[in-house]
Amino acid sequence: MDENRYNELQRNKRSSLNGAGYMCALVVEDLEGNQETINFDLISSISVTSSSNLTENTMMNGDIIADHIYREPNEVTISGSYGLFSNRNVQFSGPWDKLGNVEEYFENIKNKGYKCSIITRSLLNNSSTRFKTRENMVLTNIEWTHHQTSIEFSLTFTEQKTASLQTQNIPYTEEDEDGPEITDGIATFFTEEVLDWDMIYTLIISLLNEDNMMTEEFKNELQELSFSESGAALVAGGVLGGSVVAVGAIVAAALGSNPIGWIIAAVGIALGGIIWGICNMVNENQRRQELIAAQEKWGHEQFQYFEGDDERNEEELEDFFNFVGGIADYIKTLDNYITVYKIPTDAQQEMTIYIDDNNYVFKFNKISDSEGYQLTLSTPSKVIKQSTCWNECKSDISKLTDNNYLYKTSNRYRIYLMYSNLDEDGNPKSSGKNILTNYFILVSTINFENFSDLLTELIQNGGTVPQDRIQEFSNMG
């Protein structure tokens, strides 16, 4: 390299350092809106972290669905140093030397939560920027490292995410006493508010019976349970709860020749003398193989009766009811796909429920004492449905179909209006169809036309549905 080339490189280097380079600056705004710009002596690095979170929810079949994303606040970390004898024009006032005043200044910014903007300024014109300006940043963490004549720092700034508030003058008007109340639907659990658990227990015992998971002697013991003092002691704090007579009725319904409940008829369970007549027609080896397969499916050995051993029989009964209760817990997974919203008051109202990323307004206007209420279902942009409550409601989940919902959203959330005239104890209420609190909104991603099959799948597959059948029941596959 000759002397002319060397001198040219030095001139370019000095020009870049003195005029054409960029430096990081901090614009600090105090609580009163006053701003000042702070420069740094030496910056070694600036790192920016920008991340988002993806929500995850477990589906009925055990898979994971990730369908919503939200942004985390950005973080910026500036590392560098201030020198005691730096020739840069960076000054901080205060009671200490320069480096102590630096510490005091930045710690004051952090403690008071001053809003900051991080920018890169051109040394040539002090206006143009090279990197993205980070605004609405708050200093959240400081690390100092002391040296003899300098101090190293690491400053972490976190984005302050805010919402703007718009106000306007609203003229005062007298309250319309006949106007609707503005309410929100009260979310509750489908399996607690709607599902008939006597029916569920009847179904479970019936399916066990169908698979020969109980010996004849054990079934006789179950049917005599309602008259047994030992049975009374067993059930008093057990899974099924309630009186022994109620438990006896459930067992009798499940094992009798005329089982009650629409759902048992729907799944086509063969009970009573029919199933045992068929069993007698097959040979002993086939029965043994079927029992082995059934025990593997249920994950439990056949329930038996032990002649003359009361203690062991009582343990077997306790094991049976615990097993039935454990299966019943599978059914509670339905609460992930079906939600019930109670109507909070018996008065004209506009009740809002957030369904499938949209607000739905259920407006109830009273027609008369005899005709009850008119329902208008709408979104913020359009009216969807308008009819009387009594004409639209259903009182039995077995009557819910893909043709009688109020509305089905784009993601196949089905919205039904339902009516219940039973109190918490299952007794008829004194009030009738014109009382709004007797109604509720049911929102489901499950097709109720296949609901009986779904219950059977949940019971027989440990709370899951086979992957090749999931789409028959729900849009969460």
Image: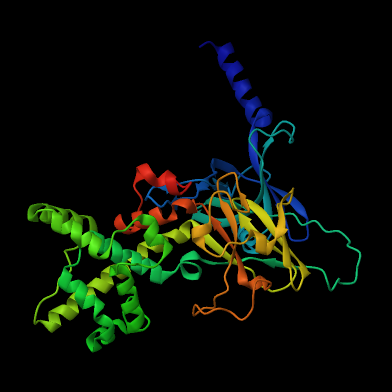
* Residue at 22 percent of width and 86 percent of height: 230
**Residue pushed farthest bottom?**
229
Q: How many numbered discs sit on the rendered protein?
A: 0
Q: Residue at x 59, y 12 (%)?
A: 4
As drawn, 322 above or below 57 = below
Residue 153, percent from left and from top: 53, 51
Looking at the image, residue 233 sits to the left or right of residue 179; the answer is left
Image quadrant where residue 94 sits: bottom right
Residue 201 in which image quadrant: bottom left
- The image quadrant where one finds the C terminus is top left
Is 167 in front, or is 433?
Answer: 433
**Between 4 and 222, the one nearer to me in the picture:** 222
Residue 227 drawn above or below residue 155 = below
Q: Nearer the viewer, residue 322 or 302?
A: 302
* Among the 4 quarters of the image, the one containing residue 364: bottom right
Position of residue 462 measured from the top left corner of the image (x, y, whole percent): 30, 57
At 39% from the left and 53% from the top, the residue drawn is 453
Colour setting: rainbow
Above-or-below relation of 31 to 425: above
Q: Relative to residue 457, is residue 317 depicted above or below?
A: below
Query: Residue 217: horizontal and vertical position, in percent?
Result: 15, 73
Would residue 279 appear left or right of 257 to someone viewing this image?
left
Q: Nearer the viewer, residue 440 or 159?
A: 440
Could you tell me if residue 73 is visible in this image?
A: yes
Residue at x-position 46% and y-position 49%? 474
- Can residue 151 be seen from the camera position used here? no
The x and y percentages for residue 250 are 34, 74
